[in-house]
Image (cartoon, rainbow, N blue to C red):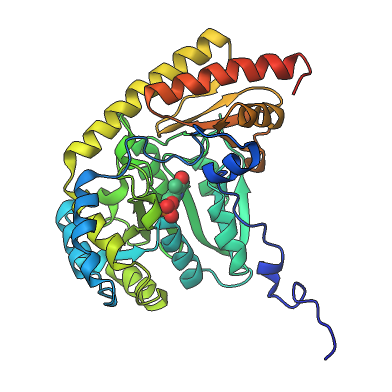
Amino acid sequence: MKDCDYIQLAVPGIRALQPYQPGKPIEELERELGITGIVKLASNENPLGASPLAVRALRGALGELHRYPDGGAFELKRALGAKLGVGTDAITVGNGSNDVLELVARAYVRPGAEVVLSQHAFAVYPLVTQAVGGRPVVVPAADYGHDLDAMRAAITPDTRMVFIANPNNPTGTWSRHDGVHRFLRGVPPEVVVVLDEAYFEFVREAQYRGGVQWLREFPNLVVTRTFSKIHGLAALRVGYGISHPQIADVLNRVRQPFNVNSLAMTAAVAALEDDEHVRASAELNQRGMRQLESAFRAMGLDYIPSAGNFISVEVGEAARVYEALLRRGVIVRPIAGYGLPRHLRVTVGLQAENDRFLAALAAALDAVGAGRP
Ligand SMILES: *Cc1c(COP(=O)(O)O)cnc(C)c1O
């Protein structure tokens, strides 16, 4: 049989894709360095771990592993609907909220259609756009954050979708509720707006509001949230979208029938009731954020004020500082791929983890500044 180039055979959008770069796994660095006791502050995971109520519920669910999940996600949708004050017909469950982002793109973006997103925005947006043959239209950021007026102005008759991360990852920037509302008012109804609120539960800013309150006013709005961040269930992959029931209907047509597994749903339902874990996680995050900010100021480092559970700090030659941190057993996230080659993103950890990171950062900056590894 004649050889083919199976890269060239792939559909055009996928041929050009660069895969998402996840944080370096702890086990990988352990293998490379032959050391243990590594601190990973690279993936915005909850340093307190999973919701204890979720872990307990999971243990009770192990007897049913031979059963297929409930494809209709009845219990999870009922719990979410009650919590958010929306009908279950407004909800789409996803294998992580990334899954929901992809479902929206597959359902509403045809090849050649434009998708508006911000410079420095979450990397999954251009990925899911290109995978379906859509054209990302990247709007320059304002002070690292979304310039919503410029994003509104970038909408053309060819635009089918807009992604807004609020707060955004990796910058931690957030948009005020009045700005988001003004933006939504200016978007034509045939353009679907995805408001990604993966860090919703962490935000303390008074001028911030979640998007669920606007669902009735704007039928083109899809709000996405996740159990990966404050609930500490990143391993299980469960997130959701909330939207007009017609959009949810469409997303549920393209969704795989068992895209969220039984254990994930069981844990998510329990986590949703774990107000104490959410409260403790948000409080720990506030304290850790203050700890990192004041240490950065003391070190003379600029940082981007963040509303999430992570912060991006300007360190100069970030790629080298990242490597120097790895050698000291600390994993953070380089964000050159987001157009920020002088910054590193660090997740807020436990106080002791933050201490380890800050000591390693001081040593790494010294070493890099002195031209040592
Ligand atoms: C972490 C994150 C998500 C959620 O990812 P999951 O697939 O739910 O684990 C979505 N959007 C942003 C901006 C994120 O940082």
- Residue 114 occupies quadrant: bottom right
Q: Nearer the viewer, residue 145 or 355?
A: 355
Left or right: residue 353 compared with residue 170: left
Outermost residue to the right: 2
Q: Nearer the viewer, residue 101 or 259?
A: 259
Q: Quadrant of the N terminus?
A: bottom right
- Residue 131 occupies quadrant: bottom right
Left or right: residue 319 compared with residue 296: right
Q: Quadrant of the C terminus?
A: top right
Outermost residue to the top: 298
- Residue positioned 66% across, 17% down in the render: 365
- Expressed as whole percent of the image width and height from the top left, the position of residue 246 reads 31, 72
- Residue 334 occupies quadrant: top right
Left or right: residue 233 compared with residue 37: left
- Expressed as whole percent of the image width and height from the top left, the position of residue 353 reads 44, 25
- Expressed as whole percent of the image width and height from the top left, the position of residue 172 reads 47, 34
